[in-house]
Image (tube, helix red, strand yellow):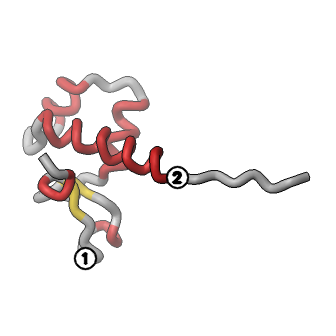
Amino acid sequence: MPLSERIVVDTEVLAGKPVIRGTRLAVEFILELLAAGQRENEILANYPGLAREDILACLSYASYLAHEYKAFPIPA
């Protein structure tokens, strides 16, 4: 499933941050919950409008960004 079916960017929602389609839940928020140790089933219980595929889309989005990020060290 393409990310665009789950993750959207709309300047009218959360100042254009990527969110899960049909919600105001930012991708970064879901990633923060996971990074803090919340389990997938806990997140789904706390946010009943979410599906497992939404969480996986957030992880996929983060993976995409990590692959796209290029760091260029500044010579000393």
> Along the horizontal axis of the image, is 9 left or right of 2?
right
The type of residue carrying mark 2 is Tyr
Q: Residue furthest right?
A: 76
Q: CA distance from mark 1 to mark 2?
A: 26 Å
Q: In front of the other: label 1 or label 2?
A: 2
The type of residue carrying mark 1 is Glu
Tag 2: Cα neighbours inside 10 Å, few (<14), some, or many (≥20)? Answer: few
Q: Position of residue 27 (x, y in %)?
A: 31, 50
Mark 1 or mark 2, earlier in chain: 1
Q: Residue at x 30, y 53 (%)?
A: 26
Which label sits on residue 12? 1
Which label sits on residue 69? 2
> Along the horizontal axis of the image, is 21 left or right of 25?
left
> Along the horizontal axis of the image, is 66 left or right of 76?
left
SS for dot 1: loop
For this rendering, which residue is in front, 72 or 33? 72
Which label sits on residue 42? none
Q: Position of residue 11 (x, y in %)?
A: 29, 76
For this rendering, which residue is in front, 27 or 36? 27
Q: Residue at x 26, y 66 (%)?
A: 9
Residue 33, by quadrant, is: top left
Q: Position of residue 14 (x, y in %)?
A: 31, 67
